[in-house]
Amino acid sequence: MTREKCVAAAAFQFIVVVDEAKVVSRFAAPVPVEVLPFAVTPAMAQLRGLGCRPVIREGVKKDGPVITDNGNYVVDCTFPSITDPAGLEKAMAEIPGVIESGLFCGYANKTTVIVGNEKGIKKITSADIVP
């Protein structure tokens, strides 16, 4: 998430490509959070305090947690519902040990989402991009 947000910040337009399984009617999908390994236990406790069920992401066909390119853990945080994504993103960022979250609220104005399925694609855009 950290590197993706660096790219989003540097980009004039940020394009995200997903399959239709990522499109939901209500925002209740797990939010990935990048956490320093030595701070994962207290960070997870504070994430729980925000109303989620945090789980360290385990590698498939691998023994142990998923490690980011920056050497950190990914904690998947499942919330019953997310009604204020920007507020949640800010609250997560204030937790010591949290590096970044998978919420990209600050980049919505320059994000285009392309949703693909077997029939083709659907383009979802935010507000007009102003240079």
Image (cartoon, helix red, strand yellow):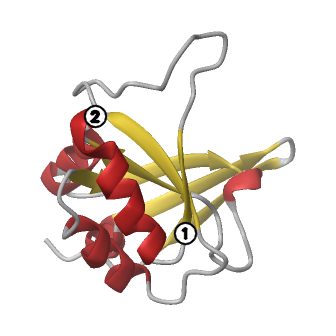
Q: Give the residue drawn at x 53%, y 89%.
A: 83
Q: Splitting the image into 4 quarters, where does residue 111 fall?
A: bottom left
Q: Which residue is mark 1?
A: 52
Instruction: Check disc 2 and give the amino acid type.
Output: Pro
Can residue 101 be seen at all in this image of the molecule? no
The spot of residue 32 in percent (x, y) is: 46, 51
The spot of residue 34 in percent (x, y) is: 33, 45
Q: Nearer the viewer, residue 73 or 19?
A: 73
Question: Alpha-carbon neighbours of circle 1 within 10 Å: few (<14), some, or many (≥20)?
Answer: many
Q: Give the residue drawn at x 38%, y 24%.
A: 67
Q: Secondary structure at mark 1?
A: loop
The spot of residue 9 in percent (x, y) is: 17, 56
Q: Nearer the viewer, residue 127 or 68?
A: 68
Can residue 33 be seen at all in this image of the molecule? yes
Q: Which residue sits furthest right?
A: 119
Viewport quadrant of the N terminus: top left
How many numbered circles are shown? 2
Q: CA distance from mark 1 to mark 2?
A: 19 Å
Q: Which residue is mark 2?
A: 37
Query: Does residue 109 lie above or below 62 as drawn?
Result: below
Query: Does residue 90 lie above or below 75 as drawn?
Result: below
Query: Does residue 65 lie above or below 9 as drawn?
Result: above
Mark with earlier residue (1, 2): 2
Left or right: 78 in relation to 102: right
Question: Alpha-carbon neighbours of circle 2 within 10 Å: few (<14), some, or many (≥20)?
Answer: some
Left or right: 84 in relation to 34: right
Query: Does residue 27 lie above or below 74 as drawn?
Result: below
Q: Give the residue drawn at x 36%, y 35%.
A: 73
Q: Splitting the image into 4 quarters, where does residue 69 fall?
A: top left
Instruction: Check disc 1 and give the amino acid type.
Output: Cys
